[in-house]
Amino acid sequence: MVVVIDGPAGSGKSTVAKMLSKRLCFKYLDSGAMYRALTWKAAKVKLNFHDDEQLCKLVNETCIRIESTDDGFEIYVDDVNVTKEIRLPFVTENIHYISNNEFIRGKMVELQRRFAEGENIVAEGRDMGSVVFPDADKKIYLDADIEKRAERRYSELKAFDGKSKLFKVVEDLKQRDYQDLTREVAPLKQVDDAFYLDTTRLTREEVVTILIEEIKKISK
Ligand code: DC
């Protein structure tokens, strides 16, 4: 069974997808982590982010591997564990160069489908229901007010680097929303057959409970 969760940054997708996969004993796929991993490598090798040819070459030469763990997953780039580093600002700031590239997206879609092959999986991202798994058994779209999304991101970042400022997080989120929604290839999209849930006033446990009830409906 394939369950997909799409939605904007800070909508609670990652936390909820991880909790849901644990509750259902499904595999968990954080597709954003794959785009982050390639961005990490491009930055490390000091590649020119404006050079599309080099970016395409990079994806062909890079091995991205995800290992499922009790806590979620670990992600490796050419055998280097980058699970923590892919959350750093230098990755987030440059990721649109990678996620806007059609050739790279094609390669990522292949990897994501291969990861899910023959598995029960909860996959989260921006184009899981629209492009990667259009025949998913359950499609979910999570959303929340920008203030709430910024608050959530701010707490995560504060725990990570202690230096982030709330107003900067709001500005960054607005910019990422714009980039995600207006991207020519596979933009963030709520597909017609998705179950929409606004998580602004819900705890993560409440969200998971609602989603489990929704998923139960398909197995009846
Ligand atoms: O979910 P996240 O914040 O870790 O995602 C990081 C970026 O990757 C996000 O700005 C958009 C991009 N992304 C994408 O283009 N397609 C996906 N399926 C997942 C993420």
Image: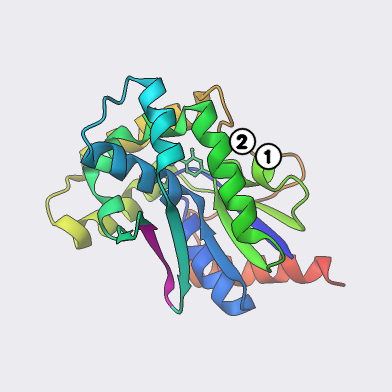
Name the residue: 30% across, 51% down. 86
What amino acid does circle 1 point to? Ser
Q: Residues within 10 Å of mark 1 (few under 14, many from 20)?
A: many
76 is higher (above) or lower (below) than 147: below
Relative to 82, 148 lies left or right: right
Q: Secondary structure at mark 1?
A: helix
Q: Could you say where residue 159 lies in the image, as x and y percent from the top left? A: 21, 62
Given residues 78 and 35, the one toward you in this image is 78
The quadrant where residue 45 appears: top left
Given residues 61 and 193, the one toward you in this image is 61
Name the residue: 77% across, 58% down. 137
**Looking at the image, do the residues carrying marks 2 and 1 touch, with CB atoms under 8 Å apart?**
yes
The quadrant where ligand 1 appears is top left
Q: Earlier in the sequence, mark 2 or mark 1?
A: 1
* C-alpha separation, residue under disc 2 versus residue under disc 1: 7 Å
Name the residue: 57% across, 26% down. 185
Which residue does the numbered mark 1 point to in the structure image?
A: 130
Relative to 205, 45 lies left or right: left
Q: Could you say where residue 205 lies in the image, as x and y percent from the top left? A: 51, 72
Q: Which residues are magenta?
A: 71-76
Q: Could you say where residue 149 lies in the image, as x and y percent from the top left? A: 39, 48
Task: Name the quarter where the C terminus is drawn.
Answer: bottom right
214 is higher (above) or lower (below) than 142: below
